[in-house]
Amino acid sequence: MSAFDLDFSLYSLLLGLALVQVLSGLVQTVQSPDRVKMGWLTPLLGLFVILDLTSFWTIAWSVRDAAPPGFLALLYGLAVMGLYYFAASLVFPTRPEDYANLDQHFFRYRRIVIGAVIGCNLLAWTGQALIGVNPVPRVQDAAAITVWLVSLLALMLLRKPKPLLVLLIFVIAIYPVSGALSLAGL
């Protein structure tokens, strides 16, 4: 087992638990339809977190040959993954019945969730740079990250549900579009 395999097993476990948090929150909410009006904002925030968590596996894989073995690398990764778990845990309410409408929960926690996701990505990009892996090797990567960050900051600042809904859909669309462009070599 290589050092990366050891580190990656911990990261995968924590990322998997974070995914379970979002998915189980969705299931618990769906099981409470008579008590909770679902809406679109919270489920889309959940989808955004799921997509970003999934994209994180590609970041971890991209540093597999450069990642230094040892306690500090594990600790750094634990900080990032712990922050992801924290964000994922806040997407859906622990007790959906406490909210007549999930939009209330969304407006209460979205800034924390989105801020934590931004923090995770900033830490990941910093970690990549520290070990000599360029997190933005191409101009289009820098442009995509800039659009993503500006969109997330706007999601934190906007107050009206309709523009938030449109922006969430846009941010979610970034992931499959980026994946398709990468697959096409663009």
Image (spheres, helix red, strand yellow):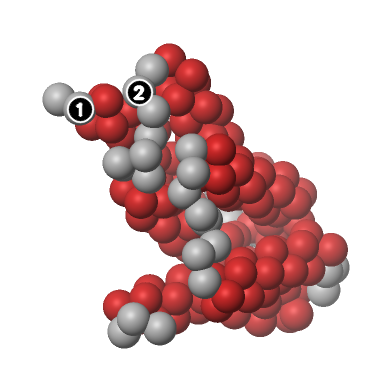
Helix, strand or loop status at disc 1: loop
Question: Please, which residue is most extreme toward the left here?
Answer: 1
- 60 lies above or below 142: above
Residue 138, given in percent of the width and then of the height, sits at 52, 71
Which quadrant is the C terminus positioned in? bottom left
Front position in the image: 22 or 186? 186
For the N terminus, the quadrant is top left
Q: Place residue 87 in its image quadrant.
A: top right
Residue 72, image x, y percentages: 48, 19
Amino acid type at circle 2 is Pro
To which quarter of the image does residue 112 belong?
top right
Residue at left offset 48%, top offset 38%: 131
Is label 2 in contact with label 1 (beta carbons under 8 Å)? yes
Residue 23 as seen in the image, left or right of residue 121:
left
The residue lying at 45 percent from left, 25 percent from top is: 73
Residue linked to disc 2: 69
Residue 146 in view here:
yes
Q: Which of the numbered marks, if any, corresponds to residue 115?
A: none
Give above or below for 82 relative to 26. Answer: above
Going from the N terminus, do you reach mark 2 or mark 1 first?
Answer: 1
The image shows residue 33, relative to residue 11, as above or below, that is: below
Residue found at the far front of this picture: 132
Q: Position of residue 179 (x, y in %)?
A: 38, 74
| Residue 90 horizontal side relative to residue 133, left or right | right
- Residue at 75% from the left image edge and 80% from the top image edge: 163
Element class at badge 2: loop
- Mark 1 = which residue? 2
